Image: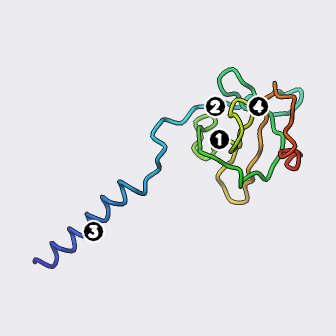
């Protein structure tokens, strides 16, 4: 009986430690972004507040920062910041399924493309 209680105590202790230290540190709620489509151009864009983003490139997974949002309430459609750049200008979108790519999104108002990002251009 004492051994069984000890095992339960250890398991509970490990669970508490895991809960405290290994959980996602993202404590703020994720932003809700929306996808807008233009039937005339068949181009989908992402809207974050007053800013509209378009697909610029792909393969930027190594530059992925903290997740800040999801698109249209779909928890698999994740939006991340691009490390080292303003989220008001650049974002990363990732649809979390097998064989998915990290897509680089550029705010439509951005005209000056950093040289380091040119390699990701589609």
User: In the shown orientation, is residue 117 left or right of residue 92?
Assistant: right
| Nearer-N-terminus badge (3/2) | 3
- In primary-sequence order, the first of circles 1 and 2 is 2
The quarter holding residue 74 reads top right
Instruction: Quote the CA–CA distance across marks 4 and 3.
Output: 47 Å
Disc 4 to disc 2, how far (Cα)?
A: 11 Å
- Where, by quadrant of the figure, is residue 93 drawn? top right
Residue 33 — which label? 2
Q: How crowded is mark 3: few (under 14 residues within 10 Å), some or many (20 or more)?
A: few
Write down the residue under mark 1: 79
Label 4 environment density (alpha carbons within 10 Å; few <14, some 14–19, many ≥20)? many
Q: Which of marks 1 and 3 is nearer the N terminus?
A: 3
Q: Which mark, residue 53? A: 4
The crowd level at tag 2 (other Cα within 10 Å; few <14, some 14-19, many 20+) is: many
Residue 17 got which mark?
none
Q: How far apart are marks 1 and 3 (CA)?
A: 35 Å
The quarter of the picture where residue 15 lies is bottom left
Question: Which circle, 3 or 2, is nearer the viewer?
Answer: 3
Q: Do the residues labelled 1 and 2 touch (CB within 8 Å)?
A: yes
Marks 4,3: beta carbons within 8 A:
no
* Residue appearing at x 31%, y 65% in the figure: 14
Q: Residue 11 carries which label?
A: 3
Tell me whether the residue at label 3 lies in contact with that at label 2, contact meaning CB atoms closer than 8 angstroms. Answer: no
The residue sitting at 85% across, 48% down in the picture is 120
Viewer-nearest residue: 63 or 69:
63
As drawn, the residue found furthest toward the left would be 1
Counting from the top left corner in percent of width and height, residue 72 is at: 62, 34
Label 2 secondary element: strand
Q: Name the spot of residue 110 as percent of width and height, x first.
A: 82, 28
């Amino acid at each position: 009986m004492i051994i069984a209680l000890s095992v339960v105590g250890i398991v509970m202790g490990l669970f508490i430690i895991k809960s405290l230290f290994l959980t996602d540190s993202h404590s703020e709620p994720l932003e809700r972004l929306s996808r807008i489509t233009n039937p005339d151009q068949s181009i989908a864009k992402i809207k974050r507040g007053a800013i509209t983003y378009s697909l610029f490139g792909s393969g930027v997974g190594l530059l992925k920062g903290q997740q800040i949002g999801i698109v249209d309430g779909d928890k698999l459609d994740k939006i991340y910041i691009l490390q080292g750049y303003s989220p008001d200008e650049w974002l990363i979108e990732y649809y979390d399924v097998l064989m998915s790519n990290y897509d680089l999104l550029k705010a439509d108002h951005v005209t000056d493309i950093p040289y380091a990002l040119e390699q990701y251009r589609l």
